[in-house]
Image (cartoon, helix red, strand yellow):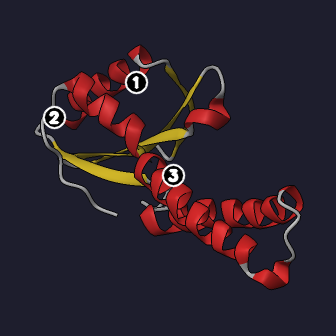
Amino acid sequence: MRVGLGGAGTFLVYFIYTAVILSIGSSILFQLSRESGIPQQIAIVGGVAVGAIGAYFNRTVIRPIAAEDEQSLLNQVKRGLTELGYQQIEQIDDEVFVFAKAVRQWLYGRVYVRVQPQQVTIAGRVSQVQKLQQQLNLGELSQVN
């Protein structure tokens, strides 16, 4: 199940946007010419820093959970997501459930839950998946990207 950018993709997005903004902004703000190379150096350093932070907090992770009774675990996951402020917005093929926050959906992203025989897979931003994991007290889950 591929639902979003992993660590490398998230890093690149944050790096590119930050580098462009810092390059243009520093050349205008400090009245530096681009030929001096200083705006590009500022852009690279800032891009790496923001890219690393963005990748750490906003990368997409996929966490499978083994389950004897996948329907019971699915109900637990749904309750946990509801308590975190999520609501189900879509269901795809009786197998994938899509959840989003009721407010500011663009800020939190979506959480995808896939039900398979003897397994429930949760995919979403790492911060949201970790909160759900703590809420369910499932302990350490294996991570697949």
| Mark linked to residue 69 | 2
State the SS at label 3.
helix
State the SS at label 2.
loop
Answer with left or right where residue 99 lies relative to residue 30. Answer: left
The residue shown at (83%, 78%) is 34
The picture quadrant where one finds residue 102 is top right
As shown in the figure, which amino acid type bears the numbered disc 1? Leu
Find disc 1 in the rendering and name its residue: 81
Of callouts 2 and 1, which one flags the residue occurring earlier in the amino acid sequence?
2
**Can residue 78 be seen by looking at this rendering?**
yes
The picture quadrant where one finds residue 95 is top left
Q: Residue 59 location in percent, x, y?
A: 45, 53
From mark 2 to mark 1, how far is it between C-alphas? Answer: 19 Å
- Quadrant housing the N terminus: bottom left
Of callouts 3 and 2, which one flags the residue occurring earlier in the amino acid sequence?
3
Q: Residue 47 location in percent, x, y?
A: 60, 64
From mark 3 to mark 2, how far is it between C-alphas? Answer: 36 Å
From mark 1 to mark 3, how far is it between C-alphas? Answer: 23 Å
Mark 1: few/some/many CA within 10 Å (<14, 14-19, 20+): many
Find disc 3 in the rendering and name its residue: 54
The residue shown at (35%, 38%) is 129
Q: Residue 70 location in percent, x, y?
A: 22, 37
